């Protein structure tokens, strides 16, 4: 079991496609609906932080990182100003964009 890569780490190979899909959703939401930079900024930062915490868990640093990593989206929903459905769409797409961006950055870091 320890010689097999962790299931969570397999997400790294799919992260570039995730970035593309979530970027398209965010662009559509911001161009056609309403631009909400603050919500999008919080979401991208929260997604990146969540990915870093889950990477720490996947690399064997401890279960506390898992709890913090999966709790972060809830904290974002609670503390981010969500004025309408567009803000919620920005929050979700931004979160996953930040998450995927952090995984891509980790992948690039591992190559060097």
Image: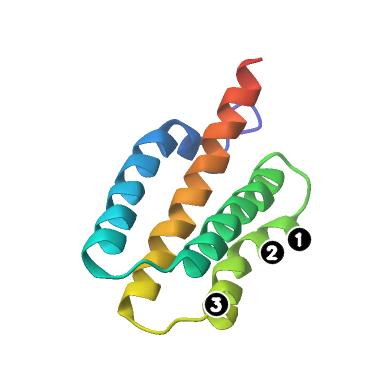
Q: Which residue is mark 3?
A: 80
Residue found at the very far left of the displayed protein: 32
Q: Residues within 10 Å of mark 1 (few under 14, many from 20)?
A: few
The part of the image, by quadrant, that contains residue 73 is bottom right
The part of the image, by quadrant, that contains residue 67 is bottom right
In the rendering, at what x and y percent does residue 89 appear? 34, 68
Q: Which residue is mark 1?
A: 64
Q: Secondary structure at mark 2?
A: helix
Residue found at the very far top of the displayed protein: 112
Q: Which residue is mark 2?
A: 68
Q: Does 60 sit above or below residue 66?
A: above
Cα distance in 3D space between marks 3 and 2:
17 Å
Give left or right: position of 92 versus 99: left
Residue at 59% over, 80% down: 79
Residue at 45% over, 50% down: 97
Q: Earlier in the sequence, mark 1 or mark 3?
A: 1
Q: Are marks 2 and 1 in contact (CB under 8 Å)?
A: yes
In the rendering, at what x and y percent does residue 37 appear? 47, 64
Q: Secondary structure at mark 3?
A: loop
Relative depth, front residue between 32 and 108: 32
Cα distance in 3D space between marks 1 and 3:
24 Å
């Amino acid at each position: 079991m320890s010689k097999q890569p962790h299931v969570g780490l397999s997400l790294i190979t799919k992260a570039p496609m995730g970035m593309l899909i979530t970027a398209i959703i965010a662009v559509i939401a911001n161009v056609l609906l309403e631009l909400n930079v603050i919500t999008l900024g919080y979401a991208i930062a929260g997604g990146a932080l969540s990915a870093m915490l889950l990477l720490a868990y996947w690399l064997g640093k401890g279960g506390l990182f898992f709890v913090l990593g999966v709790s972060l989206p809830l904290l974002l929903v609670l503390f981010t100003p969500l004025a309408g459905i567009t803000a919620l769409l920005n929050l979700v797409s931004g979160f996953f964009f930040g998450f995927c961006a952090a995984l891509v950055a980790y992948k690039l870091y591992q190559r060097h």
